[in-house]
Amino acid sequence: MVEQRHKPGVSPEWIQEQLSGFADLEHRKLQASSDEAELLYIKSVTDGQSISQAVIAPFYEMDSGEAYGAYLGGLPGSHTEVDGKQALELMLGGSACIRSGSRIFICELPKAEAGAVRETVTESVSQGPSDALGEDLTVNLNLIRRRYQSAQLKLEMTVIGNISRTKTAILYDESRVDHRVLAELKERLDTLQIDVLQAAGELDKYISGDKVRIFPKTIVTERPDRVVFNLAEGKVAVMLDTAGYAIILPAIFNDFFTAMDDKIHLPVVGRFLKLLRILGVVLTLWLPALYVAFTSYNPEIVRVQIALLIAGSRATVPYPSFVEVLIMLLMMEFLTEASLRLPRAIGPTATTVGGLILGQAATAAGLVGNIMIILVSVVAISNFMIPLNMMSFSIRVLKYFFILAAIATGLVGVVCCLVGFTAYLCSQRSFGQPYFKLFALESAGSGKKGSGEK
Amino acid sequence: MRRALCGIIALLLLCTGCEYKDIDRRIFVVAIGIDKGQEAGDFKVSLKLALPQGDVSKNEEKMQILTEESTSISEALRRMKSRVEKELDYVHCKSIVLGDGLAAEGVGHVLDWAVRRRDMQLILNFSIGRPNALEVLQVKPPSERIPSNSLIMAMSGQGTESPFITSVYTYELMRKLYEKGIDPILPIIEAQGKEEFLIDKIALLDKNKTRLVLTADETRLFNLLTRPNLRTNFPAYVQGGMYQYYTESSKSSYKIEIQEGEPLIRYTIRIKGIIEENSAQTEADQKLLDEISASGAEELRTDVEAMLSKVQKSGLDPFGWGLHYGARHWNNETEMEIWERLFPHIRFEVDAKVAVKYSGMIK
C-alpha cells in the first residue's frame, strides 16, 4: 500500500498507455473463484513458457491472493518498488507486470533467442555482431527489441496474402519516423491484393510502385543491427513471418554502399573502404563497356603501349570485341549463378574449373584475349564489393546497358549512358524521398531536420 | 511500345556504328618521316608501323616501314593503304620527322597537312632527321620493346632528361610559324648506324626553313635560358684546376630595356650547384666554393653572350624577344616595325650568379 501511494503512476493501465501502439503487448486478466489478477507483458521479449509456469499456474494453485502476492514477491528478479521510468525499462527488457489485488509486481522473465538465431550469410562483417534475422517473426522481434529498448519503438501487425496469410510487422520509432512515409506505406499495404507472399524482396516489389525498376527502392537486409541503425535514423522496417529478411524504407542510393562495419572501423579506414566500394562499382560498370569502346572505336585514348598490348592479345580472336566481352561476361554470370545453386561441397570445384581452367584454356586456344580474362575477373570481383545484394544484382544487370551503348557508338555512348542513368537516378523517389541524395548526411533524415539554417 | 524498343535495340546490335573497327584490324602508325622525293617537288613519305606482339613475354619488337613517293603527302598515304591488309591508324602517331633537305626548303606545307588532319594529334613531336627522315625511322635501339618508343621517350622527357633535347609539338610549331616576333625551332635527330640516334642540336628556322643550326653546347645554353631547372653540368676553372658543377636548380629571366634609343636585353641567370668533378682533387672549403662560383658565373656569362650574339646575327628570334617587346608596348601599328629596326642593335648583358653550395659527398 505504501509504495502505491508514493508512485501512483505505475499501474498496468499506465504502462499500457505508455506502450500504446505495441502490437506485441499482451494484456490478460486472471480470474479464479475468489481472486483476480492482471498480467501485462511484451510477447516478443518475454519468455512465454516461464510466464505460464511461474506466474499463471501458481495463481490457480494458490489458495488466496495474499499467498500469491507473497509468492510473487519472492520470485527471483521480481521488483515492487519501481518508478515509472524503471518500470518501462524493465518491461522493454523483458518483464511481466502483474497486479494481484492492489499490489503491483514487475517480474523479469526475459526471453533470449540464442539457440535459434542463425549467423549472417549474405551480409557478413569482419568484426561485429553475426546474428541474423530468422524465419520466425517473434524471434526477430526479440532480436530487434533487445537492441532497441525504447518505448518509442512501435509495432503494428497486419496480415498480407489471401492464402499465405503472412504475418507482417511494421516497426518504427514514433518520435523519429517521417509520418508521411509511414502513411504512404500503410496505404500501399492496404491496397495490396495478392494471394501468396513468401519473401521480403517480393514485398519490396509490390509496394515500390513502378513497374520497371532497375534500382532497389528498399533495403532488404538480414542484419538486426542494420534494422536498428535505420530505425534510429527514422526509417520504417517491415518484417515478415517466414521470410528471414526485413525490408527498410525509404532507402536512398547511398544506403546501399554502407556496410555495418563502417562504424566499427577507424574513421579513415571506414572512408577508405567506402571509397573502395564506389571504385568497385565504377570498375564493374564501366570496364567492359570501356574495353569495347577502346578496342573498337577510340584506341587513341589509351597509351600506345596498351593499344599494342590489346591488339596483340586480340590477334588470334576471331570475332569482334563486343562478342568477346559478351561471351566472357555471360560465362562469368553462369559461374556465379551455378555456384549459388550448387551444393556447398561442390561449390569450390565449380569455381576452380570454371574460373581457372576455363579462363586459361580460352586464352590458350586463342578464343579470348589475356586482357579480357583480367578484365572479367576484375568485373566479377568488384561486383561483390557492394554490401547489399539487391544493389549488387542491379549493378550486375546495369553494366550490359553500358556495353550496348559502347557497341553502338563507342565512348560517346558510354558517356551518354552515364548521363542518362544519372538523370534517371535523380528523378527517382523512394517513398517521397529523393533517391540520389548522395552527399546528404545519413542522420539528416529525421531528427536534425529543420534545425539548421532553414 | 516495348516491342518497338526491343526492335530498336536489336537493330542497334546489328549495325555497329560506322566508325566501328576492331583494334586488331587497325595498324598503328607510330612515326612518319617525310623526305624530298627523287623528282623536284615530290615527297618521299615513310611510315613506321608498330606490329603488336603475339607473345607479350618475349622481348621482341616488330615493326615495318613503308615508303612511297608521290607529288603530295595525302596521295602517298592513300597509295600505302593498298600495301597493307589492315587500316592505317594515325591516332597513335607520336612524331613527324622531316628530312634535312626538306627542312631546308620549307616546313610549312607538311605542317599545314599535319594540323589539318583530324586524326593526327596536335601534340606530335616535330623534328628534323639527319641525314634523312627514313634513316631516322629505321633506327632500332636494342633497348626498345615497342616500335619508336625510344624516340617518344626521349622527346617527351619521360625517359631521359638530357639537357640537350628540346621537343617541339605541332601546335607550338604552328603558333611560332604564324606569330610575329618569335621564330620556330626544331630539334635535330641524327641517325648513327642502325641502333643509335643522337639528339643534341636544334635548328633555328625563319618563318619557313632552317637557317642556323646550334651546336650541342649552344643548345644546352638555349635550354638553360628557356626552361627552369635544367639538369646539367657547367665548367669552372680555378687556379688551373678544372671543376664541373651540377645544376641543382636554375632559373633565368630577361628584361628588354631601351636606353637612349639603344635596346638592351638583360638576362638574369641564377644557378645553385654541387661540385661534381674536381681535377685538382684539392680540399673544397668555403673559399674554394666561392671561387668556383665566381669563375663558373664568368664562364657562363661569356658563353651565353656569345650564343646570344650568334643568334642575333642570324636575324632570327627563337626566344620571342619581339613578342615580349610587342606585348609591353601600346603603339600597335608601329611597334613591330620599330622592333625590326632595333633588332640589329640589341646589346646583351648577362648577369649570371652561380652559387656552388656543396662539395659533394667527400668530407
Image: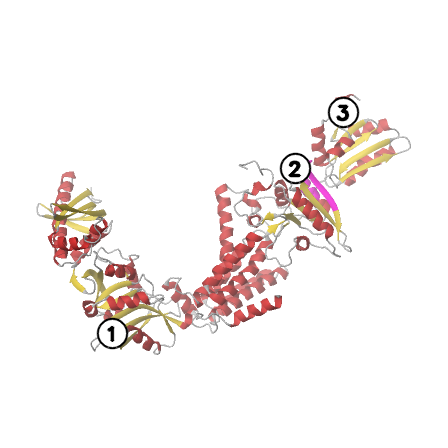
> Magenta stretch: residue A233 in it?
no
For mark 3, give the secondary structure: loop
Left or right: residue A221 compared with residue A61: left
Q: Which residue is mark 2?
A: A175
> Magenta stretch: residue A155 in it?
yes
Numbered disc 3: what chain? A
The span picked out in magenta is A141-157
Residue B358 visible somewhere in the drawing: no
Can you give x and y, in whole percent of width and height, for residue B289 in the image?
16, 42
Q: Which residue is mark 1?
A: B43
Can you give x and y, in whole percent of width and height, for residue A417 in the image?
51, 60
Q: CA distance from mark 1 to mark 3?
A: 109 Å
Q: CA distance from mark 2 to mark 1?
A: 84 Å
Q: Nearer the viewer, residue A302 or A342?
A: A302
Residue A347 visible somewhere in the drawing: yes
Closer mark to the observer between disc 2 and disc 3: 2
Say which amino acid is labelled 1: Phe
Q: Nearer the viewer, residue A178 or A172?
A: A178
Q: Which residue is mark 3?
A: A8
Residue lying farthest to the left in this orientation: B240
Q: Residue at x 19, y 52 (%)?
A: B335
Numbered disc 1: what chain? B
Rate crowding at label 3 as few (under 14), some (14 to 19) or many (20 or more) other CA atoms within 10 Å. Answer: few
Q: Earlier in the sequence, mark 2 or mark 3?
A: 3
Numbered disc 2: what chain? A
Image vertical order of residue B316 relative to residue A364, above or below:
above
Q: How is the image coloured?
A: secondary structure
Q: Nearer the viewer, residue A367 or A349?
A: A367
